[in-house]
Image (cartoon, rainbow, N blue to C red):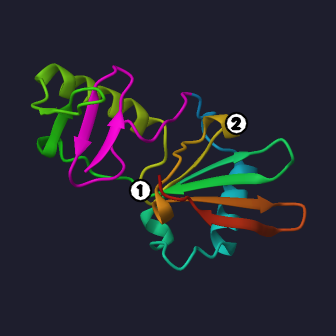
Amino acid sequence: MEHTRLMTGQWLASTRYLLSFGALACSSAAGGEPGVDEIALMNRIEALVELPEKAKPLNQYSRNYALAEAGNVIAVYFLPIEIKWDDLICLEPPPDFNPRSCTPEEISEWRRQEDEAAARRAKRGASRWFSSVDDLPYIFDGGCGFIEVVYDPAIDRIVSVQCNGYA
């Protein structure tokens, strides 16, 4: 069973999913609609990228892009999850982690937070341009469910493709 601490200080456990709705953090600015140059960059990266062996096909990922200060494009690909709200249990804070039923208010708040986060990232199979790398979705684990790609447009090359580690 994996645990994710939410902003409310409550603990959530999902017996079916490693990534639950508090795990992917996004900031609010997406930068609006991408211009012709950004669309061309996203298309070029997607044409060049070779995902790691353990990765799923590219079209299963939410694909999120931003220009870094060094001129490289950072791409963050992740597999969106379907949250099974009925499978969730709440846990008391450490050190006990005693399971208990979630209240309707807790579930409502978590659904609201997930809906807001989902609105700020690309949908499964879609690409989205962000105005800053600071606005990209991120997580500190997730294996090949979360992949970072670095593209250098000056040499038209993918410089790095990495699956995240595991927590």
Residue shown at the point (36%, 32%) measured from the top left: 5
Whether 116 is drawn above or below 158: the answer is: above
* Residue at mark 2: 132
Q: Residues within 10 Å of mark 2 (few under 14, many from 20)?
A: some
Residue shown at the point (49%, 42%) measured from the top left: 121
Choose the circle earlier in sequence order: 1 or 2: 1
Q: Which mark is residue 53?
A: none
Q: Secondary structure at mark 1?
A: loop
Name the side, left or right, on which 18 lies relative to 49: left
* Residue at mark 1: 124
Question: Count of labels shown?
Answer: 2
Residue 10 appears in the rendering? yes
Q: Residue furthest bottom?
A: 53
Residue 21 appears in the rendering? no
Q: Position of residue 98 (x, y in %)?
A: 17, 33
Residue shown at the point (59%, 34%) measured from the top left: 30
Q: Residue furthest right?
A: 154
19 is within the stretch colored magenta: yes
